[in-house]
Amino acid sequence: MAKERTFLDKFFLFLKGLSMGAANKVPGVSGGMVSFVLGFYEEMIYSFRKINIKAFKLLINGRYKSFYYYTNAPFLVLIFSGSIFSYFSVSLVLDYLIDTYELYVWSTFFGMIIGSIYYISKDFNNWTSKNVIAMVAGAIVGISISFMSPAKENDNLLFVFFCGIIGVSGMTLPGLSGSFILILMGNYVLLLVDSVAMLFKTLTEVFTGDFSFMDSEERINYLKIIGTFTLGSAFGLVTTSHILGWVLKRWHQIVTAVIIGFIAGSLGMVWPWKKEIYKIVDNKIMIDSKGDKIIQNFERYFPDFGTLETWIAILYVLVGIGLILALDKFGSERNVYTDE
């Protein structure tokens, strides 16, 4: 089981949740990979597994303290507090940096993923033929996802619920970006931009005593969409965690090999040298509720080594690698959390 945490441990766990939340919002970057590298992935998976029938019985019977500790709620509260807070803080800064210094931000991410592959694989010494095949399979799937073409936007509530199940995979599967998957499913802007903006606007109005949104069919529809997406995400988070927890206990080495391959394959998603292909309808570039152009896909290209910009980007790749190596040197142990 998880050991008792000091105040400093709790503070750093909040910061780790902050990092995971910021990563989850960026297409191509996996929050699950962040949790894996920062050492709380397995505890997170096993904690979600505790949300089961026994937990609900404790809750129904009024045994709130037992429920709190049985589900490892102290850990989950810190992680999700950090993740939620990041959406209104670090994520906004990250959005600005991507808009202003796009190439350099993606270069840093690219370097961090390279460093993460080293960080995860350096202690993995069981390179049997099964594990090598598992790693290659993970890499092939990761690369294939990187080059898939996105679907059209779909606001059918059943499909939105399914998007929630699939989109939350970025938290539970290292190397798989939930945001990128939502782009492929055509609903990234609808679910993570427009609906969230409408929810924030509605909450602001409610706090000021303005309930006029209830007369707006469009607003109610967006609230239904974000509510359905949230339910799908919660359902997906619990169910996939149960599956992954079971798999990790039985095939830990193979799963780790798949994760290494998957993260390597995800390098295609964050390749720094790419340009956006925008969504066009009736010969017009579509924009979202914030006035931003809607990205439909990316066109990747090789850098021009004759420009200073390219070499600065390569420097940022090295900075990204260095950040992970620094984490390896000064930080953190990836403690294995046991489900007892």
Image (spheres, grey):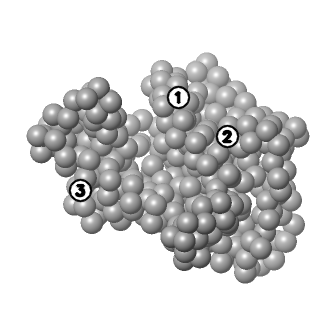
Residue at position x 68%, y 37% in the image:
15
Label ID, residue 98: none
Which quadrant, please, contains the N terminus?
bottom right
Q: Distance between the residues labelled 3 and 1?
A: 29 Å
Q: Residues within 10 Å of mark 2 (few under 14, many from 20)?
A: many
Residue type marked 3:
Asn
The image quarter containing residue 131 is: bottom right
Label 3 belongs to which residue?
A: 154
Instruction: Check disc 2 and report its element: helix, strand or loop.
Output: helix
Instruction: Check disc 3 and report its element: helix, strand or loop.
Output: loop
Q: Is residue 258 left or right of residue 236?
A: right
Instruction: Check disc 1 and report its element: helix, strand or loop.
Output: loop
Asked whether 158 or 317 is in front, the reply is 158
The image quarter containing residue 202 is: top left
Residue type marked 1:
Ser
Which quadrant, please, contains the C terminus?
bottom right
Q: Distance between the residues labelled 1 and 2?
A: 13 Å
Q: Is residue 201 left or right of residue 256?
A: left
Q: Where is residue 149 in the image (x, y as percent from the top left)?
A: 36, 55
- Nearer to us: label 1 or label 2: 2
Residue at position x 52%, y 46% in the image:
24
Look at the picture and state if 116 lies above or below 293. below
Q: In this view, does 275 lie to the left or right of 277?
A: right
Q: Residues within 10 Å of mark 3 (few under 14, many from 20)?
A: some
Q: Is residue 224 visible?
A: yes
Look at the picture and state if 61 lies above or below 8. below
Label ID, residue 89: 1
Q: Is residue 26 left or right of residue 130?
A: left
Asked whether 134 or 94 is in front, the reply is 94
Residue type marked 2:
Phe
